[in-house]
């Protein structure tokens, strides 16, 4: 795939669907909201690795895409 047709990384990891978490942005395939990751990472100072340790369904890339 050439650079013209590649999706931004956040689009791959973050999605919003009506009926899932009130349509709020979530990590793709989960019900973990981007807002929750923001709170854990930016406000509570937790590292991406700490968040993934508590939520193994997430990847470090998911966490970084959510806070991007």
Image (tube, rainbow, N blue to C red):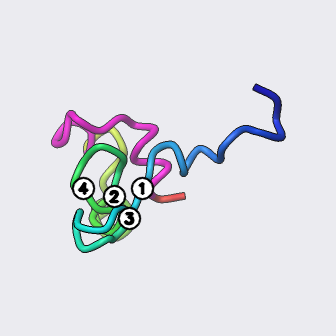
In the rendered structure, find residue 32 and report the number of the disc placed on it.
4
Q: Nearer the viewer, residue 48 or 7?
A: 7
Is 36 in front, or is 42?
36
Q: Secondary structure at mark 4?
A: loop
* Image point (39%, 65%), residue name: 42
The circle drawn on residue 26 is 2
Stretch in magenta: 51-66
Task: Measure the C-alpha gap from mark 3 to mark 1.
Answer: 5 Å
Give the residue at mark 1: 15
The CA span between labels 4 and 3 is 9 Å
Residue 44 drawn above or below residue 9: below
Return the disc, 2 or 1, that comes first in the chain's sequence: 1
Between the C-alphas of marks 2 and 1, the distance is: 6 Å
Mark 3 to mark 2 CA distance (whole Å): 4 Å
Circle 4 Cα neighbour tier, 10 Å, few/some/many (<14 / 14–19 / ≥20) = some
Observer-nearest of 49 and 55: 55
Secondary structure beneath dot 3 equals loop
**Which of pointers 4 and 1 indicates the residue nearer the eye?**
1
Quadrant in the picture for residue 25 = bottom left
Q: Residues within 10 Å of mark 3 (few under 14, many from 20)?
A: some
Q: Would residue 8 appear left or right of 19 to someone viewing this image?
A: right
Residue farthest to the left? 54
Q: Are marks 2 and 4 in contact (CB under 8 Å)?
A: yes
Whether tag 4 and tag 3 are in contact, CB under 8 A, the answer is: no
Q: Can you identify the residue that label 3 sits on?
A: 25
Judged from the image, the secondary structure of the residue bearing numbered disc 1 is: strand
User: Where in the figure is residue 24, as x and y percent of width and height?
Assistant: 33, 70
Label 1 near label 2: C-beta < 8 Å?
yes
Contact (Cβ within 8 Å) of mark 3 with mark 2? yes
Q: Earlier in the sequence, mark 2 or mark 4?
A: 2
């Amino acid at each position: 795939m050439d650079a013209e047709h590649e999706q931004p990384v956040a689009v791959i990891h973050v999605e919003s669907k009506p009926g899932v978490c009130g349509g709020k942005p979530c990590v793709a395939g989960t019900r973990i909201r981007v807002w929750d990751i923001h709170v854990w990472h930016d406000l509570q100072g937790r590292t991406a690795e700490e968040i993934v340790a508590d939520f193994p369904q997430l990847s470090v890339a998911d966490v970084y895409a959510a806070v991007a």
